């Protein structure tokens, strides 16, 4: 079972999410929260696999709640930001502090379910076009020399892999593009995450934009 916590200050939203998830045999809602502070408490107690986190909540917002959970828990859950507007500064900030991806509140039920299953497998919910737009509007770029010394530590092949990760390609797709084995790509991805200090693919791509290694254009 994939254990899920719902964090949203609107009861109707939480109810709708619960109904959708409860219809799936492998998904279980193990807690709800109406504020960011409550979300932190509920998650620490319930130990879910995935959190669906609204970004705008009372007390502390979803960004700070995400940051607290990612930084304080030895094995934090995978956090998906649920938002109304995909180009929101809140979304970008949540991704920067550790969210695995984001989902629009108007997303279809099947997309919500697929997203929960995806991040539960430790994959990232990466929308390349949306992330490019967020980086273009909200990111800080061109700071590679001071802010990201890791850029110079990437091998040429690792740099290629990171660029392809930013386009949303899976390991298998990257392997076909580079004409190498999937195991080789997996090794390169692991090295990219270690070099960038990223927790997952989303964080690595955010780091690539922030450093200026990749430009939104």
Image (cartoon, rainbow, N blue to C red):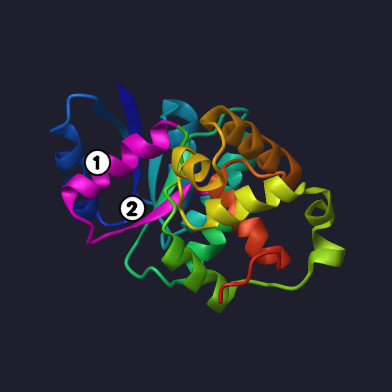
Seen in the picture, residue 145 relative to 217 is either above or below; the reply is above
Horizontal side of residue 199 vs 51, given as left or right: right
**Residue 111 position in % (x across, y down):** 24, 49
Determine if residue 51 is in view.
yes
Mark pair 2, 1: CA separation: 17 Å
Q: Which residues are magenta?
A: 99-121
Are there few (<14), some (14-19), or many (20+) residues within 10 Å of tag 1? some
Residue 207 drawn in magenta: no
User: Is 13 situated left or right of 74 in this image?
Assistant: left
Q: Is residue 95 above or below residue 4?
A: below
In the structure shown, which secondary structural element does the residue marked by tag 1 occupy? helix
Identify the mark at residue 8; answer none if there is no mark: 2
Query: In this rendering, does residue 89 appear at all?
Result: no
Looking at the image, which is closer to me, 205 or 73?
Answer: 205
Q: Nearer the viewer, residue 49 or 198?
A: 198
The answer to whether 132 appears left or right of 188 in the picture is left
Residue 21, percent from left and from top: 20, 37
User: Which circle, 2 or 1, is nearer the viewer?
Assistant: 1
Q: Which residue is mark 1?
A: 113
Residue 189, given in percent of the width and then of the height, sits at: 62, 39
């Amino acid at each position: 079972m994939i254990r899920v916590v719902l964090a949203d200050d609107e009861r109707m939203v939480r109810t709708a999410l619960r109904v959708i998830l409860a219809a799936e045999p492998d998904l279980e809602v193990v807690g709800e929260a109406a504020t960011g502070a409550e979300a932190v408490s509920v998650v620490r107690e319930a130990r879910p696999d995935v959190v669906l986190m609204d970004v705008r909540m009372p007390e502390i917002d979803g960004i700070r709640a995400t940051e607290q959970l990612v930084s304080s828990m030895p094995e934090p859950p995978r956090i998906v930001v649920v938002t109304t507007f995909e180009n929101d500064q809140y979304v970008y900030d949540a991704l920067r502090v550790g969210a695995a991806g984001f989902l629009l509140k108007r997303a279809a039920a099947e997309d919500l379910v697929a997203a929960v299953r995806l991040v539960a497998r430790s994959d990232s919910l990466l929308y390349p076009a949306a992330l490019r737009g967020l980086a273009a509007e909200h990111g800080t770029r061109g700071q590679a020399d001071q802010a990201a010394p890791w850029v110079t530590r990437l091998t040429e092949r690792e740099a290629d892999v990171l660029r392809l990760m930013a386009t949303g390609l899976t390991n298998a797709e990257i392997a076909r593009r580079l004409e190498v084995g999937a195991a080789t790509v997996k090794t390169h991805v692991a090295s990219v995450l270690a070099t960038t200090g990223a927790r997952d693919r989303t964080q690595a791509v955010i780091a690539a934009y922030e450093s200026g290694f990749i430009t939104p254009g």
